Image: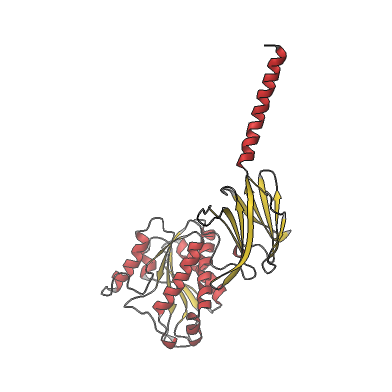
Amino acid sequence: MKKSSCWQLLWIVALCLWLIPSLTFAASMRKVTSFQSQVVTEGRQRFLRIEIGMNGPINDYEVKGDGILNPNRLTIDVDQAEKGDVRTEILLDRQFAKTLRFQDTGKKLRIMVGMQVPAADRNYRVYTLEKDRRAGKPHRLIIELYGEGGRRGHVAGLKGRTIVIDPGHGGSDTGAVGVGGLREKDVTLEVSKKVRDILENSGVTVVMTREDDRDVYGPTATDAQELQARVNYGSYTPNVDVFLSIHCNAYTSASSNGTETYYYPKTWLDGLLAQNLQAGMIQHGDRRDRGVHEARFYVCRHSTMPAALVELAFITNYVEGNLLADEDFQDEMAQGIAEGLANYFAASGT
């Protein structure tokens, strides 16, 4: 073989080796294939849902607010993706956001949303959905924008936790009875379920000692048997981070009012948990702050993990009894409890 032919062959081989990674990279790049947005109402929450369809799985993406310089801009960087044939800039429903803009940045697709409010954890939600052949839906990146007042039912910083929620009383034990015959066991169950929903939406594994109106041990149990049955949910569930018991307060004087939280000082974490729960409830419930107190409540003392018992408000107080029956107040207290849990984990470093 002539020397020049050898050099030509080597040049062709080198060119192929250089092109193969580029061709492989191009083949692995996902492209935007569809876009749609609509205002959605779920329960009492109204928000803008954006669906960005792609021709492949969306494996890696990063979500961030742009901070001080652009507080209203939400940015999502999707790895190994590009804009495709969709428009660079799309107008959105101005109640929630002004525009959405696509920008190719080499190996990443940057999606920038100009929100009407500062980008904060409670103002948006970003997640992915797999291809749904039956519904004719591609792989999708979902952006939900919640506007003024933020998103309900989600708290950052809780993902991966395991929490036991104990709705106080139940079944044969009504708990305290207050304004208009309102029963403590009914209020605690409703608030506990709202807390459960927020926590599960935030990536928490939630264990409920009861999910309906029943005795946990049984109607013929002694007080100790019933309380121990509740504690057992924490003892027999692996890797539980927190045990939380939810109650309403009561007193012979109808003027007694406010919110308070109890703990038993097994470790310093019990007190820290109670402090953060109390702060969250006071912030959202806006009731008199009766403080955090040590007590020998069975469920706090016998739980091996950090535990606390919250008293939402006084069911025997006319104003607070009506609040406890009100769904808006229940929602606020549930949100306060969830945020208190997140603040506890952040403060404890556990």
- Is the residue 236 above or below the residue 294 in the image? above
Q: Is residue 259 above or below residue 338?
A: below
- Can residue 103 be seen in this snapshot? yes
User: Where on the picture, by quarter, is residue 46?
Assistant: bottom right
Above or below residue 31? Residue 193 is below
Q: Is residue 272 visible to us here? A: no
- The number of numbered discs placed on residues in the rendered structure image is 0
In-front residue for pair 12/231: 12
Q: What coloring was used for the rendering?
A: secondary structure
Q: Nearer the viewer, residue 217 or 288?
A: 217
**Residue at image coords 72%, 14%:** 4
| Image location (x, y in percent) of residue 53 | 60, 54
Closest to the observer: 275 or 170?
Answer: 170
Q: Is residue 21 left or right of residue 154?
A: right
Instruction: Please give the name of the residue rendered at 70% of the width and 17% of the height, measured from the top-left corner.
Output: 7
Tell me what residue is drawn at x 39 percent, y 73 percent.
168
Which quarter of the picture shows residue 178?
A: bottom left
Q: Position of residue 146 (x, y in %)?
A: 62, 67
Q: Give the residue furthest to the left.
A: 220
> Which residue is at the far right?
69
Q: Residue at x 51, y 86 (%)?
A: 319
Q: Position of residue 160 (x, y in %)?
A: 48, 56
Residue 216 figure quarter: bottom left
Q: Is residue 221 left or right of residue 92?
A: left
User: Which corner quadrant holds the N terminus?
Assistant: top right
Residue 346, position as x, y percentages in the image: 54, 59
